[in-house]
Amino acid sequence: MSFRKNSKASDNLGASLERTFKFLKDSLNSDGFWSDFLTLAGESVYWVSGYVGDNIICHLDESKGDTWLKKMGNSILAHQSADGGWGYGFGVPSDGDSTSWCLRFLAKLGIQSQASLDKATSFLLKHQSPIDGGFRTYANPSQVGRYMMLDGTVSFEGWASSQFCVTAVATLALIENGSTQGIDKALEYIRRGQVLEGYWNPYWWSGKLYATVNCMEALKAAGDNHADILFAAQNWIAKKQLADGSWSDSYQPVEGWPFSTALALKGLMVAPDYSLKDKTKNCVGWLLNQQLPDGSWSSNHILRIPHPSKVDPWNQTIWKQDGKAINAAIKDQNRLFTTATVFSALSEFENKSLKGEL
């Protein structure tokens, strides 16, 4: 493995990325997957592996990564469900978000057959709402309800409603795999959903940055003129930076989080703005100072599990800090999700610096 070379990049940044990559590679389970976020359904395997894999392979050299990444991709393909999708983990029903991240990773590996891709794309498109054009996590909530051993009286209105954090990633998965179906309606849903301050409300996340940054990236990937929308989002992100260079993006006022700070850095780089150069550099400095000796970054309660009936969890302020519960906010206890996000953000910063874009 080798990173894109950057003669201008600081030695500290290069060394940080090498340690991070080693941590992520060494954190593979014996079955060749990554896993994180311990919930009632166990740890996530396919969703986390797709996400971490995508965030790594985006920033490797032109060889598209080492053999072990392709081996993982083939393992993901071998576990594609009969319905065409992937779920949270072993035995969990397929969902739109996990399928999107697996598709994004597989697109960059270039190993998926057309038949597998067609099946997965068809499954994903079934998660697009015919009403508002957004994508939901579960198009058939009765399946996950049975998995959770709930009777038919429990409403899944929230889990089956369109969500910006899911729609953005699904849109990117379709674009990256060369599909044109459903994209225009999804983009319109995203454009309509930006609030006046410039962000998008999240469903599954404790803070707004995950949904906001992925919506920004989906709009940019579409290639249309969304400059005003992106500017409003970047302006909101810039205003939220703390004095030490970090971001605190949670339902409770806390000190800076590595996950939030890395997402903010990615958001500031969606459309590079010279006026944000100092904020970007301070952000990078904070992240480098927060790296742990093993190459990872500390985890926080970044993922939330709303009650299946809840349609507006961003208005809820009380969350249990317990993964094995509903209405809970949980950590990526293995630090993989956070660390992969920081790795991606710092790698992108290094690459854009090389190109003179920052």
Image (cartoon, rainbow, N blue to C red):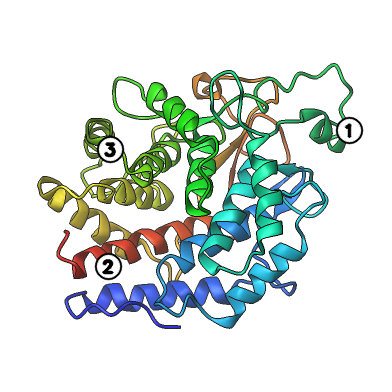
Amino acid at dot 3: Ile
What residue sits right under mark 1 in the picture? 149
Residue at 33% from the left image edge and 51% from the top image edge:
266
- Earlier residue among tags 1 and 2: 1
Label 3 neighbour load within 10 Å: few <14, some 14-19, many 20+: many
Q: Residue 122 got which mark?
A: none
Q: Position of residue 90 (x, y in %)?
A: 79, 55
Residue 357 vertical position relative to residue 234 in the rendered view, above or below: below
Amino acid at dot 2: Asn
Q: Position of residue 214 (x, y in %)?
A: 42, 42
Residue 358 vertical position relative to residue 86 in the rendered view, above or below: below
On the rendered structure, is 274 left or right of 182?
Answer: left
Q: Nearer the viewer, residue 16 or 112?
A: 112
Q: Secondary structure at mark 3?
A: helix
Label 2 neighbour load within 10 Å: few <14, some 14-19, many 20+: some
Q: Secondary structure at mark 1?
A: loop
Residue at 65% from the left image edge and 29% from the top image edge:
327
What residue sits right under mark 2 in the picture? 351
Residue 168 vertical position relative to residue 319 in the rendered view, above or below: below
Outermost residue on the left side: it is 275
Amino acid at dot 1: Met
Dividing the picture into quadrants, the one containing residue 67 is: bottom right
Can residue 251 be seen in this snapshot?
Answer: no
Q: Residue 237 got which mark?
A: 3
Residue at 48% from the left image edge and 75% from the top image edge:
64
Q: CA distance from mark 3 to mark 2?
A: 21 Å
